[in-house]
Amino acid sequence: MGEVVRYTYRLRPGATAQRALIAEWDRCRFLWNEAVHQQKLGGKPSFSKLSRLLTEARARNTWLRTGSQVAQQQMLRTYGQSLNHSFAVKGRGRPGYKARKTTKPSVEYTTRGFRLIDGRLALAKGVTIPVVWSRELPSLPTSVRIYRDNLGHWYASFVVRREIERVPEAAGAIGVDWGVATTATTTDPEFDLPYRGHRRRCVAEVAKAQRKMARRRRPKGKAQSKGYLLAKRQAAAIRKKAARQNLHEARVWARRVVDRHQLIAVEDFKPSVLSKTTMARKSADAAVGTAKRELVERGRRAGRKVVMVRPAYTTMTCSNCFARAKQQLELAERTFRCHACGHSDNRDRNAARVILAVAERGHTSVDDVRHVQPSSGSVAGAVRAGNPTASGNR
Ligand SMILES: [Zn+2]
């Protein structure tokens, strides 16, 4: 049993291997374009028609025969799938030609087309590529997709079967509030996820690269200069690096949180609502998005109870007595003070506690909790003890 997932690694192909990969891609692309051409002439080709296309093209064309049949088969299979998909979804355009200049190389091999030898990825004709094994493969892969990104980096994405991880039993409960200054503030400071400086530095670096781009930009219709393209690549590289660091930190953090808590109450933060403002804000939101996804996925996989709590009123409600403030707190105001019970707490910590209290009572929004209990200092104990009957009787 287990689950089927993708594990992706950076590749370090030498010049020869890169040439071989590009040539493989060219051949696959040729077949794809042939299939597109036939579709334009004679309607939707079936899978058997596509495999005939492959046999005939290889018989005719010695250049095609120098390439891997597995990769070419796979390319046409992908074409067939994307064509079927285009017919299934109304208003969807048919898959089009792949031009050399505008498409990024990507080839796929099934088990017959590749092997792993001494930590290297071995393809046909003695082409071997060093792999950066950033983590261990959980099992022998059944297929691999090799591709190059917009920065010119090569990757191998393996399809593997993975055992569903057994996570130790845990009894704890945690509430998580998302934010800009601190990515995740939780009910327990030990599990907070700080927003790291290197990302802030990255924002400054991206801004610098973008200013460079603006200076070097040529008017519409004219080809962009080398300097412009270089600055554009720099900006993309910095963003990518920050995203990778984000993901790594989010994974480590999510594992720590999930290992120790059975109930995980998460503010259901929707970034698109908040952030159309500054770049710093956007990157902080991206960090939240990554951390939230990692936490929720990992928590569910481990069989934890993950409760998504609507963000409305979480920062305006007292975690001690559930009284709601009359006004939204100013963003600069970092301390929550309750007018009803006098409780005072760090603003985000209070929100995390409200989120947890809502989930502990079996609800998903602050309003649901308020409907079953009046907001007075006397019910504080009921909320904290998670005892619904007590609050109902008051
Ligand atoms: Zn209060």
Image (cartoon, grey):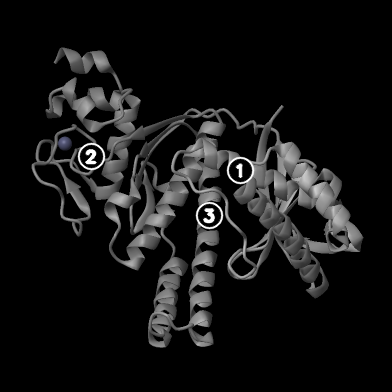
Question: Which residue is painted at 81% across and 53% down in the image?
Answer: 57
Q: Which of these two is toward me, 156 or 238?
A: 156
Ligand 1 is located in which of the four quadrants? top left
Q: Which residue is mark 3?
A: 247
Q: Which residue is mark 1?
A: 43
Residue 185: mark = none
Q: Nearer the viewer, mark 1 or mark 2?
A: 1
Mark 1 and ligand 1: say if the CB distance to the nearest ligand atom is below 8 Å: no
Mark 1 neighbour density, 10 Å: few (under 14) some (14–19) many (20 or more): few
Q: Earlier in the sequence, mark 1 or mark 2?
A: 1
Q: Secondary structure at mark 1?
A: loop
- Where is residue 23 shown, x and y percent of the image? 78, 66
Residue, x 20% and y 29% (percent of image)?
367
Report, in whole angstroms, how far the alpha carbon at label 3 lies from the one at label 2. 27 Å
The residue positioned 24% from the left and 13% from the top of the image is: 389
Question: Against 89, is 345 above or below?
Answer: below
Compare marks 3 and 2 and give the one earlier in the sequence: 3
Which one is nearer the viewer's eye here, 222 or 394? Answer: 222
- Relative to 382, is 188 above or below? below
Q: Which residue is mark 2?
A: 312
Residue 163 coordinates in the image, percent (x, y): 70, 33
The residue lying at 25 percent from left, 26 percent from top is 383
The outermost residue toward the front is: 41
